[in-house]
Image (spheres, rainbow, N blue to C red):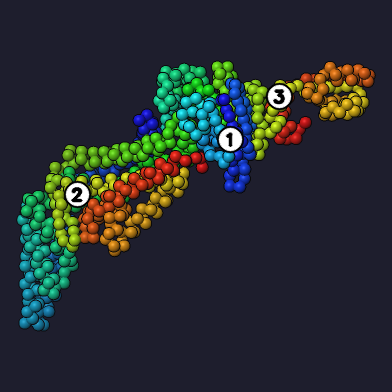
Amino acid sequence: MIIHIQNVKKRYKKEWVLKGINIKVEQPNIIALVGPNGSGKTTLLNCMTNLLSFHEGTVELVGKKHTDPSLFKEVSFLQDNRILYGNLTGYDHLKFICNVQHLSTARITDVAERVGMSSYLKKRVRNYSLGMKQHLLLAMAIINQPKLLLLDEPLNGLDPTSAITMRNILLELYNEGTTILLSSHNLDEIDRLTNTVYFMKDGAILKESLLDLNMRRYTVSVTDGKKAKKILEEKQIDFTSINENQISFDETTIDLQTFIDYMNQNDIQIYDIDKQKIGAERRYQELFEGAK
Amino acid sequence: MKLLVFELRKIIFDKKFLYLTIFLFAGIAILFLRNMLFDSYIEKEEQQKIDSYVLTNQSNKRLLERTLEVDPNNEELQQLKTINDQMLETLFELRSIRSLDDWQTRLMLENEFFQMAAEYKNAGGDHPLSFEEIEKTIALNQKLLQENIKPEHPTYTTALPNFLMIVTNLFINLGAISLLLLFVGDIVSSEFENRSIYFLYTQPLNKIAIFTSKWISSIFVYLFIIFILYGTAIILPLLFGDKGTFQYPILLEKNQEIRFITMKDYLIQSFIIVSIIILVVVNVCMFYSLYFKNTLGSLFALSGTLFAGYAVTFIPWKFLFWLNPFQYLLGESRILDQNNSLWYQGIAAGVVLSLLMYLLSLQKIKFSKLG
């Protein structure tokens, strides 16, 4: 089991910030944790890596208990750039990881090249830009070729080029067999990375997380909207009325061919069909902003 | 070992480390330069001191003469006048040899004068010199004469051992603690404040090893401070000052009696007690850093502990000196004043307290989480 989180609960004083989190990952995958600020994403990542304690539940990563420091030979955690030492160089950081993890220092050059930081590898971190720091953090996280990579807001502050580089590297790592669990606010990027998204709200993973984000949503324009809506209501089919002659529905509620058949049987003409992937952003809006 | 090297790199490549090292080096160099420049002032100062004694004795002479005019048969006043005249004579003689650099004669005359001053006071006369000052000066002069060692000015000296003593006194009277706290006072707390401890905690490292490497780094920094401080304080007098002697007598009080130790012994004892208090400070500071997880809080708590500990030394119960390592906060007085306890009495307590704080810190870091 790569990730096995069972009923993890944590509270700050009397307030529960994690309310029984369960996550099981058996095969390499990219999983995104999405939720508004304060939903418990970072707390969960910190609990998983033993940076925070929790009150109930168990966490196992790559088959080891989360309190076992040796798991960090196979698990990397990309945190925010405050963990970096400004007076040391990027090389110093990477060399330290190589030393404590008994890795060859030859990897430093390779990983620096891979993330595109060779030109400033030996500069002091205090002179790095935000993007450069993010590159270093990524290099630090992947230098040990981890089985599991945890990333807390990895795309924060990245320019589009850096974000693309980061995304490509993450996809490469996934293809090489690394499981990636990331928290992010960048829903566009998440859509490009994965379909497995856990939506978190008030310290819990929402049930709707299990819905397939690859699912399509149709928006159909018809000649007689009133009649079409009445038919769908009679058949107890869930839909959304966009405007007078426009209806939208998910492919799980009714498949497109059946819908067309219903319309034809009632002499209603369809003059436009728009098909869209629901995606993380749309799902997020539905879950957290009440949009439908 | 790898962790220790990383810790040391973090400290050494910090700009603060560079600035403090320069400050340390420059501070000692300026102190030595001052002593070199004030070399000529020493004679002037001695002259002024004798002149002030002359003025006192002349004024006493006039007073005694006037009183004797009224009461010519007063034997006590006659005796005082005789002693005062002899003191004046000695002072004139002393003044005449000031520039000759004949230190043996000077010390003998000085002692003669101080003995007469004591006699004068015993006979009922009034003199600004205290009995304690008289007794100590005579004893030191005698010791110097006996050992055939040229006296050095207590402040403006360029002789190697005596300059080392000046530097040592600055170091053992809070100097070492202040320097160490400036260098590594935030070695643990800043990691929590900057959140860089998260990086170390997410490596396959034992938390005890993380703490121990920081502890050893602090001790290395202390040794580095010693190296720079004493290195500078030795090289400068060797190049531009006098060789002096490490047999130079240092006067101290032990069980209400005057005793002497050599300069060598004084420097060794100073090094021991300052090392003990540094050991205590490092361990207490690191424990508080783990507890408060911020620099300001831990330094406040440390200061409070040090001052409270030092205040305990004022409790008139001699046994407490065996239990209180904070007596070494002001190390100079701890060696020079051994009336209530011996200089080494707090060493064992210092070692035990350090060990205790170290073990408590290990327990604390074992379960340390984010703030």
Return the mark for residue B266.
2
Relative to B77, is A143 on the left or the right? Answer: right
Chain for numbered disc 1: A
Q: Residue B62: which quarter of the image?
A: bottom left
Q: Nearer the viewer, mark 2 or mark 1?
A: 1
Amino acid type of disc 3? Asp
Return the disc, 1 or 3, that comes first in the chain's sequence.
1
Amino acid type of disc 1? Leu
At x 9%, y 78%, the residue is B76
Return the mark for residue A212.
3
Q: CA distance from mark 1 to mark 3?
A: 23 Å
Q: Tell me where residue B323 appears, x and y as whole percent.
A: 30, 55
Q: Nearer the viewer, mark 2 or mark 3?
A: 3
Amino acid type of disc 2? Tyr
Q: Residue B105: which quarter of the image?
A: bottom left
Q: Which residue is mark 1?
A: A44
Q: CA distance from mark 2 to mark 1?
A: 59 Å
Chain for numbered disc 2: B
